[in-house]
Amino acid sequence: MQKSSKSLNPLPYADFRSDTATAPTPDMFAAMMKSSLGDDVYNEDDSVKALERYVATLCGHEAALYCSSGTMTNQLAHRVHLSNPPQSAIVDIRSHVFNYEAGGISFHSQAAVYPIMPANGQYLTVEDIAPRLVFDVDVHYAPTRVISLENTLNGTIMPIEEIVRIRELTLEHGIKLHLDGARLWHASIATGISMREYCSHFDTISLCLSKGVGAPIGSILVGKEDTIKKARHFRLLFGGGWRQAGFLAEAALFCIKTNWPTMENTHRQARWLERAFRQVGCRITNPVDTNMVWVDTTDAGFGVDVLMAELAKEDIKISGSGFNARVVLHYQISDEVIGKFIDVLHKLASLPRMKVAVDLTRKSMREQPSGIYKSDDESPPSSPAPCALPSPKKLPLEDPENPRSKDSTDPEVATSPLPDKAVFEEKDLSSKKPHCFFEGEEQEKDSDGLVTPPTLPLGAIRRKDQWPLPNSFSSPSAFLKGADRPVSAYGALSSGGSLEEVGNAQKEQDESTVRRTQSLDIVETMRQQTAFDKGADKSLGAEAKKMNKLQYRLSHNPASKALKRASGRIVRWGSLLSRES
């Protein structure tokens, strides 16, 4: 069957977009060569009449009418049933007659249309329909004249038991029952229920010959003799009469006899493809009863656009957008093509980073799960505060098991000059201990509690004249960068001062450091606040300009001017009438 299926596709690509995408085959052309050449408008073409008799007998009805499209056969059926306004039709909200026929029921038949979403999400039931029936008892409402069903709908089969229940409801209230059976061929093969059994519960049935069995063109309407006679009249009114249609009818009859039995293999391929989609993490959104696979690729980590691009490299076409796709199989799809399709799915599923990319498109930054962050103390990103102040840099803690010693043999420690960058330690500001030391140095204290540089012996402390005076600071930023040094207690000690003087110098140094730190914090705060205010002023200025521009346009609008003039006249006339009265 794989070999046969492959050989029947004359196209250079495999088309999964719809089962209407099948192309005529050489055998089909050979059948078309045997057609009659009569005029169907005069009902004189033997090939067309043969097709109509065959399908009417197959469905157990009296007559049939061959038309150019399923939209035409559906609209003809509703037009025949809806002949006396006011009137209404009940349809499935997902049905073809409601969504894809340009509002034809309302236009052609002058009827209100009441769509219903099935409670079970798959097919309409009596419980869905009965409460919504409108009876001819109140002139404010359009009574229900037709109930329109579809089988299959999105590839899902409507159970015959529910069809029987709805038919009993329509007979009880004198309502017509129409079936859009474009793919009823598939339901019959999948369930084993004959076309005659299905069609016996409906007044009219539309059967598609293109998407159903792969004919080049056409659909056929089945019903009673008088119904089909009236529909033929409306077909001409709609502009649907055609002349030498015999060669198309021969092709359609050939497809019913040849392609219809192959649908069992098509259903097998659909289930095969469904399993492959599930294996790569896709979600199937509708039951795969026949030849359609409705899929959501979100959980698989790739979009339909990516899937379409990869399949195009294998000469495969599908339809869809975002993360949702509909894959439709037909008799010209081979097992070899299904294998290529599945290989592409596994290739996309094996790519890294795709799942994260999908998560980022589906969720905002604040809604991302904590599992995507590296550690527990990390949190989802959030917008920064407009005036967040930088905190002082902290000195890295020394390793307690390997502290740096003042007599270290490390040449960088023993011979390096004092560092160039001053860093502030966050401690209690009321403490007497020094708050300024140098990055990379360890604090060493003498017997009096004074801090000495660890890299120099006590006798090698710099003299007071080697330290810059406070007035030598070039700028606050220079102080922070450590380009200039504040006077310290070391200068007082090296110049021979007493311990009291050294303590006072140390205290003065601490207070000076605190004052400078606080001053710089205030300067930085004011700088950032100024920048923020400038941005806010710009934003407010832009909003003000927009409002002024809008007010100017409103005030100079011709309608506004006319309203102002009219208001003035009213005021003048009012004052005049008041004076005269």
Image: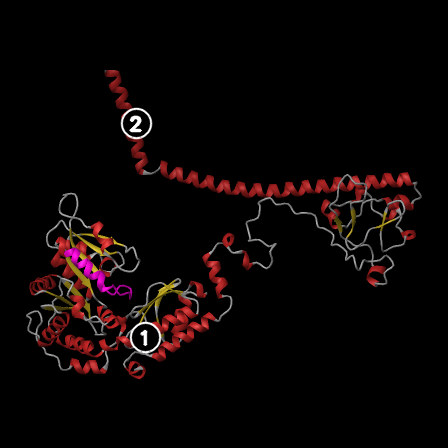
Specify start and end residues of the magenta stretch as a single range.
Answer: 150-170
Instruction: Give whichever of discs 1 and 2 has the lower sequence position.
Output: 1
Comparing 540 with 70, the one in front is: 70
Question: Which residue shows up at 46% across the image and 40% down it?
Answer: 545
Quadrant in the rendering for residue 580: top left
Mark 2: few, some, or many residues within 10 Å (few <14, many ≥20)?
few
Comparing 64 with 521, the one in front is: 64
Q: Classify residue 151 as left or right of residue 369.
A: left
Image location of residue 424, percent across then percent down: 74, 47
Question: Which residue shows up at 9% across the image and 71% down it?
Answer: 40
Q: Which residue is mark 2?
A: 568
- In the image, residue 164 lies in the stretch drawn in magenta: yes
Mark 1: few, some, or many residues within 10 Å (few <14, many ≥20)?
some
Please tell me the numbered disc located at residue 351.
Answer: none
Q: Quadrant of the C terminus?
A: top left
**Mark 2, secondary structure of its residue:** helix
Question: Which residue shows up at 47% across the image and 56% down it?
Answer: 363
Comparing 383 with 186, the one in front is: 186
- Residue 238 to residue 391: above or below: below
Q: Classify residue 447 as left or right of residue 95.
A: right
Q: Is residue 68 visible?
A: no
Q: Which residue is mark 1?
A: 268
- Which amino acid lies under the numbered mark 2 shown in the image of this protein? Gly
Image location of residue 257, percent across then percent down: 19, 78
